[in-house]
Image: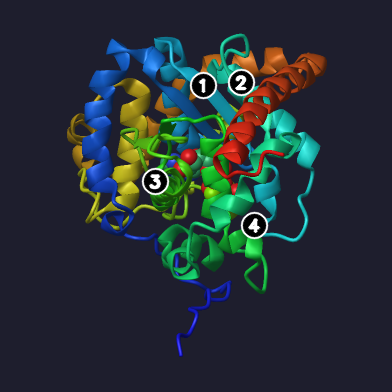
Amino acid sequence: MNTVPQPTSPNPDAPAVEPSTDALGTTAAQARSAVLEKLIPKDPGRFRVLTGDRPTGRLHLGHYFGTLHNRVRLQNLGVDLFVIIADYQVLTDRDVADNLTGHVEELVLDYLAIGVDPARSTIFTHSAVPALNQLLLPFLSLVSVAELNRNPTVKDEIAHSRQSSVSGLMFTYPVHQAADILFCRANLVPVGQDQLPHLELTRTIARRFNDRYGAGGAVFPEPEALLSPAPLLLGTDGTKMSKSRGNAIGLAADADETARLIKGARTDCERHITFDPAGRPEVSSLLLLAALCQDRTPQQLADDIGSAGAAALKRTVTEAVNEYLAPVRARRSEYARDRAHLRRTLREGNERARAVADTTLAEVRAAMNSHY
Ligand code: ATP
Ligand code: MG
């Protein structure tokens, strides 16, 4: 008899170990991202981007350098950008979505502050697009429980979950993401490294749907990941910087709070500062952060700091971050004064997303012979 593998239970004492880079396919995705970076500016109209965030708290520097910066850059190159606020997915790892409206508005504020332009791009909430969610049922039929059970990011999320058992929503998380991406036929997804296994499953689902229902054609594209130079920025405790883990430096934090958080960041006991992501992940992540803010290489920064030690490194990082974010923070305060504008942005984005989803669903139903 075949036994169905069961997802492991959440463990609050789980060691703070990230899934390894190779297990996530980061090296191959980085190589492919370099190729895509050459193709995109030549023909930006060929690409549509879907990317987004869970409204679980304020966006942080991991988001910024992992994906947000890429979103705005792609938009400004002429790529069609869809940004999903994944509100249903908040419930993957907790029973209740706290302060949902507040978190959603804060996300929209962050997007506007970093330069997402609602005249060119579509910002929308998952729950407002019913046709998107209808894709979930046929997509679920295309994956096996064993495949879902193998996903290293889901295992990591389960280890950090606030729930005592694994919900079906958590277990099927990558399939919802496939619906989020494929409803608008996005072919490019700028993400952090944790999302690579999910994206691989999206590609599998697209391929299987096309094989089964496409009648020789392709209903869905197989979307590709676009990794940034910071696919995994670490938080102040040395694990993935994450909204839900209390280890994040928020985009909206003020200069003093930023200084305090960076001062408390974990480093190691070696005084001489070197850039060695495998051997010294915490120090290297801080160097990378400052380097990205100052448009320098982490190695250059490490050479400059040398034997001045971790305190000097943290001072450098604090100055770099605060200087880099000052204009974003100023724009954020401006937008925060007009909440009606935030709500209008979302209403218009939801309408646009609904129209796109309705078209896709009609084609899916036709392909599946369920168009009555
Ligand atoms: P949560 O803890 O609630 O899951 P999160 O901080 O992991 O929040 P998500 O909303 O799950 O954020 O992720 C949104 C996007 O940001 C994804 O593309 C993800 O890969 C990227 N991202 C999140 N954290 C980081 C990080 N530390 N480094 C690089 N990219 C990141
Ligand atoms: Mg997450």
To which residue does mark 3 refer? 207
* Residue at 73% from the left image edge and 21% from the top image edge: 351
Q: Where is residue 32 in the image (x, y as percent from the top left)?
A: 24, 35
* Residue at 37% from the left image edge and 60% from the top image edge: 19
If you read the primary sequence from the N terminus, does the residue marked by circle 2 or circle 3 appear first? 2
Q: How far apart are marks 2 and 4 (CA)?
A: 24 Å
To which residue does mark 2 refer? 122
To which residue does mark 1 refer? 81
Q: Where is residue 204 in the image (x, y as percent from the top left)?
A: 40, 50
Mark toward the viewer: 1 or 4: 1
Q: Where is residue 327 in the image (x, y as percent from the top left)?
A: 54, 14
Mark toward the viewer: 4 or 3: 3
Q: Nearer the viewer, residue 225 or 321?
A: 225
Disc 4 under 8 Å from ligand 1? The reply is: no
Dot 2: what SS?
strand
Q: Distance between the residues labelled 1 and 2?
A: 6 Å
- Amino acid type at mark 1: Leu
- Amino acid type at mark 4: Thr
Q: How far apart are marks 1 and 4 (CA)?
A: 25 Å
Q: Where is residue 119 in the image (x, y as percent from the top left)?
A: 62, 9
* Residue at 40% from the left image edge and 53% from the top image edge: 197
Graded by Cα atoms within 10 Å as few (under 14), some (14 to 19) or many (20 or more), the crowding at tag 1 reads: many
To which residue does mark 4 refer? 92
Quarter location, residue 16 = bottom left
Graded by Cα atoms within 10 Å as few (under 14), some (14 to 19) or many (20 or more), the crowding at tag 4 reads: many
Q: Which of 313 and 336 is in front in this view?
A: 336
- Amino acid type at mark 3: Arg
